[in-house]
Amino acid sequence: MSDFFQKLNLPQMIPHIINRTTNDPILIKTVFRIKDWSDHALWWEQKQQWLLRTGWTLDKCGVHADARLIFTPQHKPLRLGLPNGATLKMRACFSSPVFRTVMGICRVLNLRHPEELSLLRPVEEKKKKKDKDSSEELYDLTDVPLTAALYNGMPAHFADSPKTEAVYKMLSVSLPSPAPEAIAKLYRPASIVDKTHIHTRWLDSSRSLMQQGIQENDKLGLRFKYYTFHDMDPKYDAVRLTQLYEQARWAILLEDIDCTEEEMMLFGALQYHIGKQSLSQDMVSSCQGMDDLESALKSLEVKMVGDGNILFCKTYSKKNVLLTTLEKNTVHLIFDHFPPCRPKRLTLKGYKQYWCKFQETSISYYKSKEDRYGEPIQQLNLKGCEVAPDVNVAGQKFCIKLLIPAPEGMNEIYLRCENEKQYSQWMAACKLASKGLTLLDSSYQSEVQNIQTFLSMQRSSSAAPTSQTDESINTHSLVSPRYQKKYKPKQLTPRILEAYQNIAQLSLTSAILKFLQIWQALPDFGISYFMVRFKGSRKDEVLGIANNRLIRIDLGVGDVVKTWRYSNMRQWNVNWDIRQVAIEFDGNINIAFGCVNADCKVVHEYIGGYIFMSTRAQQQSDTLNEELFHKLTGGHEAL
């Protein structure tokens, strides 16, 4: 009898056996004794549905005689494109929701907080005739057993062989930049419309891979989807930190996020430094610079408490321009209400004087110094506002952009400072106020120092050794194509090396943390774009989804029209019949929109996902509340 069954192609025969022996489980048990089929399950092809309730009969599952059932493994090989550009082959669960599948992938890769990541379909690449024979390098982990133990600082399942150790090194250490020809083939969004197409490729976290048409050995991208990085600790997050750096790096190089010229040179210098450090040491074994990790982490997430304080200053204004003086320094306050109108020139001619004070978390200004104890002309509460830098050190431009919550959306305000010292003080004050903290907080001085350090990195170093300018570096892998077209390599090299002098003493870990800190400070950081049409509008617009707000953007000129914060959101729902998202905010503000080039489920999942991320700090346990995630993101299907 055993020889007979060995000659059978069981995966093809099992459906017929089951259909003909529905009431006879004995034969099925006999089949299962031949081989370990515990990972197999039934896939209902017509319904695109897994039959995972083993206690149910086929009749109870709704299966009829003409149904085609496929007996197939639940875990299949999958090719994963990582943020660093490498391709990893490993087994993934094709029957569980994508959210749980990603948790299993991250467990193998030693990535903490898998809720921040997800899977997306790759961009379709147009292959040329010459590239037909080209094959990508695969790092194979299909046979790696999962273990929780550590060996020499890495998970034990990576220490089984030199091959698996090489995989872990690839995951935890930044890879050398590819050739310029390979970089030129990568997808680069040319407009905000192209950016909206990027985020339409995310998979549905509530459905399985098979339900979304993913087959064995297909390629998917593993990326950080939600830009709220919880509990980042370099001691335990070597892989997570490296992959996040790689995703940020390629977002800048491929112009997915914009930055100024000076910031690009600093990014290039940090990449150059990280590349050199990665060649000489591993992230896991590197202990250099660990003493300053506490201060480096404070730059990513500052925890502050304190009392209030008052800063007095003089203010001059004409129309929508205010010139503020604080302790013999000058600050320009430009009040821009929606739609934003940004003055191209600022002059001091014909300005009227006002008196301004910074108290608690608010800025108030008065007609004169004598009126400062009365009612102010206007009071700007910075709690909950968005603070972004707008700096050009070489051009002596030190501006602060504020988005202040208002009933109709957000008011946009610009502060222009006179010098670096004043900018550092005001930027630190605004950052603290946005978090509900005051100037007497113990972290105020350290925040000022961090900002001054960041500015010093962008400042040209006249004392840089001339021998460094002769060093050859690959500028094509350090700056975006915009600056490659603007400058020749001979012009870029000395500028990058000048910035490199300011960060050459950083350790590998500190350099990566500094890179991520500057990346998170960019005005467009963490915004995912979707093309939508608002209810009552006749034209398509862009909806930006950030970790704490929704942004309405004019598609024609790219200007921000309105902004709504999640903290003011009362409820949101989706009309699945007409595929329309409706959101209600405080103050009886209601918006509704339909998605043009994406399923509204993707937008719904983004909003619910960010709200779920905000609950993590309140949870004492490290266990993910998967049920809550699906309630917030899954819609009617999950409920």
Image: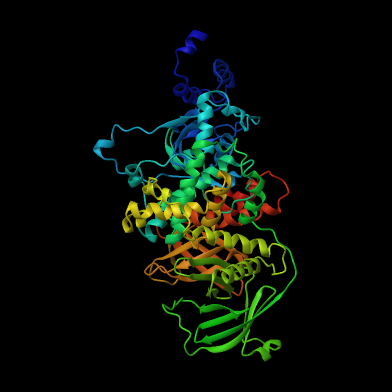
Q: Is residue 265 left or right of residue 314?
A: left
Q: Position of residue 429 (x, y in %)?
A: 64, 69
- Identify the residue at image location x=48%, y=10%: 4
Q: Quadrant of residue 157?
A: top right
x and y percentages locating residue 608 in the rendered image: 58, 56
Q: Nearer the viewer, residue 182 or 274?
A: 274
Give whichever of 309, 575 is nearer the camera.
Answer: 309
Residue extending farthest to the left is 129
Q: Quadrant of residue 377?
A: bottom right
Rendered location of residue 184, percent (x, y): 33, 47
Q: Nearer the viewer, residue 344 or 542?
A: 344
Residue drawn at x 60%, y 31% is 54
Q: Looking at the image, what colour scheme do you see?
A: rainbow
Point 50% across, 28% down: residue: 142
Residue 222, can we see it? no
* Above or below: residue 148 compared with residue 344: above
Residue depicted at x 55% and y 71%: 402
The mark tally for this picture is 0
**Quarter-wise, where is residue 197 in the image?**
bottom left
Is residue 512 visible to the viewer in this orientation of the structure?
yes
Residue 489 x, y percent position in the rendering: 34, 51
